[in-house]
Amino acid sequence: MARIGFIGLGNMGLPMAANLVKAGHSVTGFDLNTNALTALAQAGGQAAGSAAEAVEGAEVVITMLPAGEHVRQVYLNQGGLIDVTKGRKPLLIDCSTIDVDSARTVEAEASRAGLSMLDAPVSGGTAGAQNATLTFMVGGSDQAFARGKPILEAMGRNIFHAGGPGAGQAVKICNNMMLAINMVGVAEGFILAEKLGLDWQKLHAICATATSNSWALSSYCPAPGTVPTAPSSRDYAPGFMAQLMLKDVKLSQAAAEAAGSPTPLAAQAMSFYQAVCDAGDGAKDFSVVFRWLAGQGR
Ligand code: NAD
């Protein structure tokens, strides 16, 4: 069993760290939010006073932070994780969803310091994090992947090696771009259904077995009350915050522009998530786009 330093104990990081503890690993964590540290201690981990303290003596370092700027700050700053761990050579695993450039920059810096690093963003939401059923899409060398896989298996069910450094992030932004568009599509369907006098439960039951089915429809339906465990049934408490989805679609749009790839629906979806955030709902689950769209109707 490994000694693991875990930085970023938010909606995803905390249940992931708790699953590592359940699997018998020794987990020391750090987050800027002290409530998260208390929760980690309750789950059987140890709370540290700083990121550097959390990774002291760690064989594996895992980060689960909001965006590229946080990941660069935590790894690259003087006294950052690369600086403080380079003598001991732990495996570094960043599970955050960030831009491919930041992932490759941090990995290159780690490699210069003699450290192995994986970008290992996840899919499956907070339920997947709690139930250890996440999908990991991993970028990095074959050797680093072989070292990281048994650790990731304590937090997820499907662990894919997507390619070299940054490949995990590239898969992730394509996945989330498709999800962002899909969620808007499901929202439009359920809003129209209501206007046509249909019952949402019946529509849900039928479409979940028909060609419009998707994860956004069957497991995460944005129409309140159709799926009891979905964020829509708890006033859109996250889940996956709209501001994080907006970040991800901005990342995929930037990548699409750089690659010359056409993404007109993603551009439209991005403007909707931007409007949701501008309306003050950025900290709600991204499926709240349903409520925003419904408010645009006559
Ligand atoms: P979150 O905001 O709930 O958690 C991030 C945590 O990082 C917070 O607790 C914050 O205090 C902490 N943090 C920020 N800067 C820090 C620093 N310098 N040092 C220590 N801690 C710091 O976000 P989340 O929902 O857990 O998402 C984390 C990442 O996972 C994001 O990149 C997101 O896009 C991705 N993701 C989220 C979901 C989801 O359903 N929530 C699903 C897949 C991927």
Image (cartoon, rainbow, N blue to C red):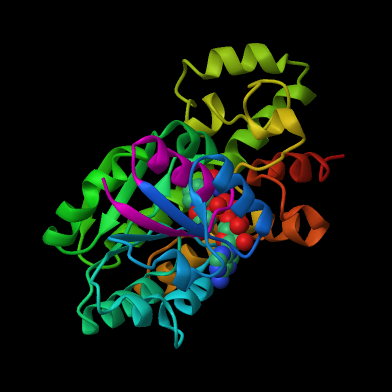
Seen from this angle, which residue lies furthest left? 143
User: Does 185 sit above or below residue 7?
Assistant: above
In which quadrant is the N terminus drawn? top left
Q: How many marks?
A: 0
Which residue does the image show at 49% across and 57% down from the upper left?
29
Which residue does the image show at 70% across and 18% down from the upper left?
200
User: Does 160 sit above or below residue 191?
Assistant: below
In which quadrant is the C terminus drawn? top right
Seen from this angle, which residue lies furthest bottom? 78
* Image region (quadrant) for ligand 1: bottom right
Q: What stretch is highlighted in magenta?
A: 1-25
Which residue does the image show at 62% across and 65% down from the upper left?
32
Along the line of sight, the residue nearer the viewer: 195 or 25 = 25
Please state the horizontal and vertical placement of residue 262, each as a whole percent of the image. Answer: 42, 63
Please state the horizontal and vertical placement of residue 143, each as a whole percent of the image. Answer: 12, 60
Apparent side of residue 289 relative to residue 257 in the rendered image (left or right)? right
Please state the horizontal and vertical placement of residue 7, each as a whole percent of the image. Answer: 48, 61
Q: Is residue 31 magenta?
A: no
Is residue 246 visible in the rendered image? The answer is no
User: Does 18 sit above or below residue 81?
Assistant: above
Which residue does the image show at 29% across and 74% down from the upper left?
107
Name the quadrant containing residue 56: bottom left
Q: Does the magenta stretch include residue 6?
A: yes
Is residue 110 visible in the rendered image? The answer is yes
Please state the horizontal and vertical placement of residue 34, each as a whole percent of the image. Answer: 66, 58
